[in-house]
Amino acid sequence: MMAADSGATILENKDDSPKIPGKKKTKFDIIIIGAGPSGYTAGIYCSRAGYDTLILSGILPGGQLVNTTEVENYPGFEKGIMGPDLMIEMRKQTQRMGTTIIDDEVVDIDFRHKPFKVLTASEEYEGRAVIIATGANPRKLGVNGEQTFAGKGVSYCATCDGPFFRNQELIVVGGGDSAIEEATFLTKFATTVHIVHRRESLRASKIMQERAIKNNKIKFHWNSAVIDIKGDQKMRQAVLKNIKTGEEKTLDVAGLFVAIGHEPNTKLFKKQIDLDDEGYIILKNKTHTNIEGVFAAGDVHDRSYKQAITAAGFGCMAAIDVDKYLTENA
């Protein structure tokens, strides 16, 4: 299983001005907020370029990969690697390059003046440049069994996990473009893909709807919701309920893919960084944000790919952009 980075755990502070704890300040050239694939990759590149680099990873570092099982599609691992193990290796490599990693939660930021200030519950840090790599989290259904069978049948990424379900029946929950795209992709492996949607029509684009409707492997369950997920060591069944009639039915399936969107971890930045209507960071040029010296990398701005390998690539890009910025503003 493999999804993109989720980054640091952050807390929103509703006060406009940062609350400065009365403790020693620590200054760095570059501060990276988040420790998923994009944050670690940015750390590797920044440290190799000779910058004093800090990663604030949050309390649970590693992004979404720490909650995944086997990763088959990250280059360099012929036999695959477990998600948490991959993140441990990334962390070790980042530290070997000289990056300081602190597992602390960011509670406030101040990008209005330079050097930029990033505050945790215990310390205030200053940086000449900042890379935001806090990632995004998939929206959950919030039903019984979802957490129990996460990574054991329940998935949030068809590209990551589809090949594990060859010749089996699957469910995709959702009715937008991403849900229909994932369902269509999964027909390459599954015998049948059940699309469960709360409404009686899809929200996806017309061309994607037509492709799905014409696909003999796809079956639709309109006005329906998943209310329970059952199994033993793995998921075995999903209970559906018709919202209009109240009728319930059980489907024997090997997997359930949730495709109801993602939530970028950007609440902390919404008063200083330009965000789109869904909360993703808007990039002005390459990985630059609206604030000169503040950059973004990974799922925190990427609405399309949401893969660990692309998140890592964005981390590399942000580090190169930061190097150019700091060189020009030395």
Image (spheres, rainbow, N blue to C red):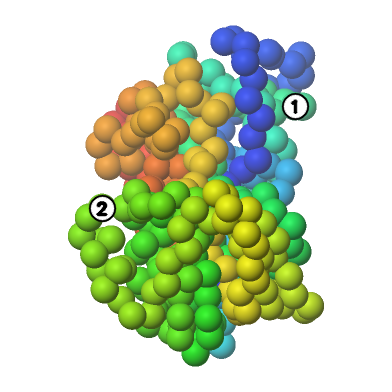
Q: Residue furthest left?
A: 207
- Residue bearing the label numbered 1: 121
Comparing 254 with 284, the one in front is: 254
126 vs 103, left or right, is left
x and y, in percent, of residue 182 in the image: 40, 66
Comparing 108 with 69, the one in front is: 69
Q: Quadrant of the C terminus?
A: top left
Q: Picture quarter containing residue 150?
A: bottom right
Q: Is residue 190 above or below residue 126?
A: below
Comparing 238 with 79, the one in front is: 238
- Amino acid type shown at disc 2: Ser
- Amino acid type shown at disc 1: Ala
Q: Quadrant of the N terminus?
A: bottom right
Residue at point 74% right, 16% down? 21
x and y, in percent, of residue 231 in the image: 75, 75
Q: If you read the primary sequence from the N terminus, does the residue marked by circle 1 or circle 2 appear first?
A: 1
x and y, in percent, of residue 167 in the image: 49, 89
Instruction: Give the CA distance from mark 1 to mark 2.
Output: 45 Å
- Residue bearing the label numbered 2: 205
Packing grade of label 2 (10 A; few <14, some 14-19, many >=20) is few
